[in-house]
Amino acid sequence: MTLGAIAFGFGANNAKNEAWRIVYTINFFIAAIAASLYLAMVLGQGFNIIYGRPTYWVRYVTWTLSTPLTLILLSFLGSTSLPIAASMVGADIYMIATGFVAAISPKPTSYIWYAVSCGAYLGLVYLLLHHYRKEAEQQNPRGRKVFYRLLTVHLLLWTAYPIVWILAKTGYSVIDSGLETMSYTLLDLAAKVGFGFLSLSSLRQLEQTIETPQRYQERVLR
């Protein structure tokens, strides 16, 4: 995470234009926040027994800070309108907040809050697949494949988090704490650093699909 943050930071400093600087900067903070999470865990911080439930509450703090930035990144790439972008961020924060309540609640109450959190996630999925994709394709029809890839990777990664949650000790205890931590770590690396590099690749492809007056004239002349 730290190496990813450093790479994104250098990219932001040397960005060729404002759009690249914005994408690099957002990715820098996403990776830096995630690095802070794992630093806290290494130092033995961010873990407490809350209402009798062992909870890594620092995960939820960092998710509350980093995941809205991921949605802001997607919104920037897709030129999303403010109401849709705000709705996605709101659904995301509500999802994480209710997920935290589920983590600290006794069973079976925790499953009720888990269902509420999953409901918020389904609302976010709807916003992404319907409103976000529609606006993005309207803004850049030639970038349809780029947005399809972004959404596919994003939703696959984010859907894995509640699956790990319900399989871990927070849910049905199918997997032990070691496998839970490893799963979250791999997902975080993919969803933050990996997705960050994917967003940079997507920006490059989107720039190539935007038709400038010069390219338009060249196409017409051909």
Image (cartoon, rainbow, N blue to C red):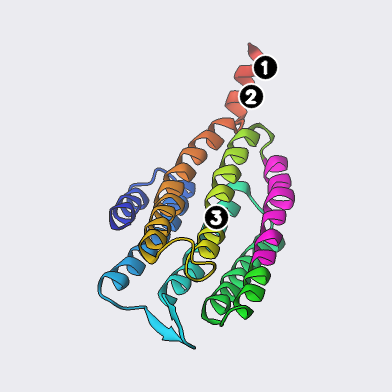
* Badge 2 element: helix
Prevailing secondary structure of the magenta residues: helix
Give above or below for 215 relative to 161.
Answer: above
Residue labelled with disc 3:
158
Q: Position of residue 184 (x, y in %)?
A: 42, 59
Q: Disc 1 versus disc 2: distance between alpha carbons?
A: 6 Å
Residue underneath mark 1: 220
Q: Residue at x 49, y 48 (%)?
A: 19
* Between marks 1 and 3 in the image, the one whose residue lies nearer the viewer: 3
- Name the kind of residue labelled 3 in the image: Trp
* Quarter of the picture holding the N terminus: bottom left
Residue contact at pointers 1 and 3, CB within 8 angstroms: no
* x, y percent for residue 109: 63, 80
Between residue 198 and residue 45, name the one nearer to us: 45
Q: Is residue 68 visible?
A: no
The stretch of residues the image draws in magenta is 118-139
In which quadrant of the rendered image does the C terminus lie?
Answer: top right
Disc 1 to disc 2: CB gap under 8 Å: yes
* Disc ID at residue 209: none
**Which is nearer the N-term, disc 3 or disc 2?**
3
Few, some or many residues within 10 Å of mark 1 (<14, 14–19, 20+): few
Distance of mark 1 from mark 3, alpha carbons? 43 Å
Asked if residue 136 is among those painted magenta in the image, a careful observer would answer yes
Q: Nearer the viewer, residue 183 or 38?
A: 183
Residue that label 2 marks: 216
Q: CA distance from mark 3 to mark 2?
A: 39 Å
- Crowding at dot 2, Cα within 10 Å, few <14 / some 14-19 / many 20+, comes out as few
